Image (spheres, rainbow, N blue to C red):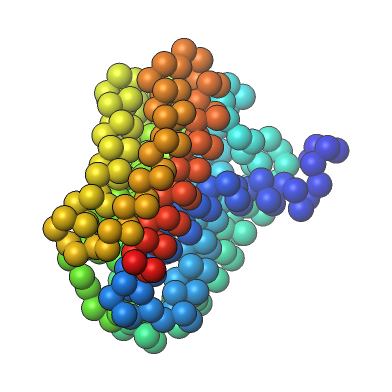
Amino acid sequence: MSAKVTRLQAWVLAARPKTLTAAVAPVLVGTGLAAHDGALAILPAAAALLGAVLIQIGTNLANDYYDFVRGADTEDRVGPIRVTQAGLLSPASVRNAMAGVLTSAVFVGVYLVAIGGWPIVWIGLASVACAVLYTGGPFPLAYHGLGDVFVFVFFGLVAVGGTYFVQALSWSPDVLLAGAAMGSLNTAILVVNNLRDIETDARVGKRTLAVRLGPIRTKVEFGVLILFALVAPVVGVLFFGWPIASLVALVAAPFCREPLRAVANFSNPRELIPALGATARVVAIYGLSLALGLGLG
């Protein structure tokens, strides 16, 4: 372990706290929708938030471990430190921590199952399984161009819909719209990450969607994802009865300019590192403002 990084600091790096907005924002939006429909339930909402954060951390640990053992994380990789590849933590300790965190998520899920029944069982099992299968197992999703689909579904549709369901105990059509909006923005984070790593991933056989599409079409994908999220509140107001206040989510629009410009014009992968943080900031601003607009409006 590096003398400059303590063991606690290494575990914080492994958890990747800057990525947690991807887990928190959809839960906030699902809770905002529940409040809008008069179904706000604080304890289930809090449990959904805790479960989402645990699954995100478990996914991060799984990525760190499996990318290392598969040889995908090399010295040529650009981006935040991967603790296993950097030798800050042993592969076994990261693998065990992953198992512990995901087991904790299962325990949180038991409470949610008691509230929501069988739908939450299937949602929970699929979420935990895909947290591992994203980079682990015999058919890792991220290595076969399915990472974008995984993020869109589980950090959008499932996260928003599941959070709404454990409070309202029913589904609402506009849950799909809100879930798709959050899924699009969270997928945009992954797109920036994979665009940055497109060359190193291709060299080690990690066939992300960015590798398959190429840089130009991946840039288009990023723009479409951002555009869809910004249009969604307008659609919600016009066709799903969302309050006018939900348009406050559009305050995120000016913050999209920086990552859009960076993705469109970068020449060096390192130039996308700030864009990754800027996109995560958009997710946080959009999710919080949309949740408040729905809930208070």
Q: Quadrant of residue 170?
A: bottom left
Q: Residue at x 71, y 38 (%)?
A: 87
Q: Position of residue 127 (x, y in %)?
A: 38, 62
Q: Is residue 257 visible?
A: yes
User: How many numbered marks appear?
Assistant: 0
- Is the residue 163 above or below the residue 41 in the image? above
- Is the residue 223 above or below the residue 89 in the image? above
Q: Position of residue 188 (x, y in %)?
A: 37, 38
Name of the residue lying farthest toward the left = 239
Q: Residue at x 68, y 51 (%)?
A: 12
Name of the residue lying farthest toward the right = 3
In this picture, residue 246 sits left or right of residue 273? left
Q: Position of residue 293 (x, y in %)?
A: 37, 61
Q: Is residue 152 visible?
A: no
Q: Position of residue 255 (x, y in %)?
A: 45, 36
Q: Looking at the picture, tell me which residue is in the foreground, 191 or 5.
A: 191
Q: Residue at x 32, y 57 (%)?
A: 246
In this picture, residue 43 sits left or right of residue 86? left
- Is the residue 116 above or below the residue 297 in the image? below
Name of the residue lying farthest toward the bottom = 114
- Is the residue 98 above or below the residue 276 in the image? below
In this picture, residue 237 sits left or right of residue 186? left
Q: Quadrant of the C terminus?
A: bottom left
Q: Quadrant of the N terminus?
A: top right
Q: Residue at x 37, y 85 (%)?
A: 115
Name of the residue lying farthest toward the top = 267
